[in-house]
Image (cartoon, rainbow, N blue to C red):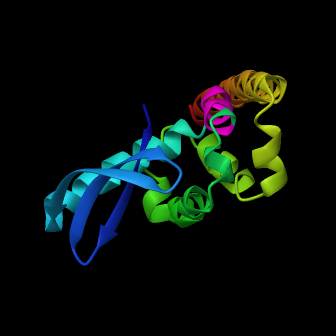
Amino acid sequence: MGSYCCFSCLNTFSLLVWLKPRRFLLLFSLSDDTGNRLRFQLELEFVQCLANPNYLNFLAQRGYFKDKAFVNYLKYLLYWKEPEYARYLKYPQCLHMLELLQYEHFRKELVNAQCAKFIDEQQILHWQHYSRKRMRLQQALAEQQQQNNTSVK
């Protein structure tokens, strides 16, 4: 079972299944708006999957990161860092992972399950710290607004 990649050529969209390095299975082909919409959705989903270190470990263990075509596809996906695309992301850490995947050393390290586990733990710690800090900032803002409202009266 392969993962999917999408490629577009001359206003035609083709959904391709990545079977093995440099082997594709053409599932269907669409043109114009329908194809562009589907391509956007598929690439959005795939880019967000990159936020999952276990998925990256899965790809690394199966040799996807050794395939030049797949690495070039990852390079192509860097357009998601542009604000007009990034605003659709639910998991912004996927952009950081996408950036790190541009480095061969990082791609090689992902074969190790311990590396994926460490990244996963660091993401959880970051999320916990961010959540607490955001809650404190919101409480301080609410208190400040309450003080401003009482001083105006």
What residue is shown at x 44% (from left), y 59% (from top)?
Answer: 85
* Residue at 64%, 51% in the rendered image: 98
Q: How many marks?
A: 0
Question: In the displayed structure, does residue 146 sit left or right of residue 39?
Answer: right
Instruction: Inspect the magenta stretch and tell me whether residue 41 lies in it.
Output: no
Residue situated in front as seen by the camera: 3 or 35: 3
Task: Give the overall secondary structure of the magenta segment.
Answer: helix
Give 123 or 47, whichever is nearer the viewer.
Answer: 47
The quadrant of the picture occupied by the C terminus is top right
| Side of 1 where 59 appears, left or right | right
Closest to the observer, 79 or 142: 79
Observer-nearest of 48 and 4: 4
Tell me the quarter of the image containing the N terminus.
top left
Measuring from the top left, give residue 90's x and y in whole percent: 48, 38
Q: Is residue 149 above or below residue 64?
A: above
Q: Quadrant of residue 6?
A: bottom left
Q: Quadrant of residue 132?
A: top right
- Assess whether residue 56 is covered by the magenta stretch: yes
Give the answer, above or below, for where 82 lies relative to 48.
below
Judged from this view, the residue extending furthest toward the bottom is 10
Report x, y in % for residue 40: 33, 55
| Residue stretch in magenta | 52-60
Q: In the drawing, does residue 124 fall left or right of residue 14?
A: right
Q: Report whether 103 appears left or right of 70.
A: right
Percent x, y of residue 89 = 47, 45
Residue 112 coordinates in the image, percent (x, y): 81, 29
Using the rendered view, name the quadrant where residue 128 is placed.
top right
Picture residue at 61% right of the left edge, 27% below the top: 146
Question: In the picture shown, does residue 68 fall above or below 116?
Answer: below
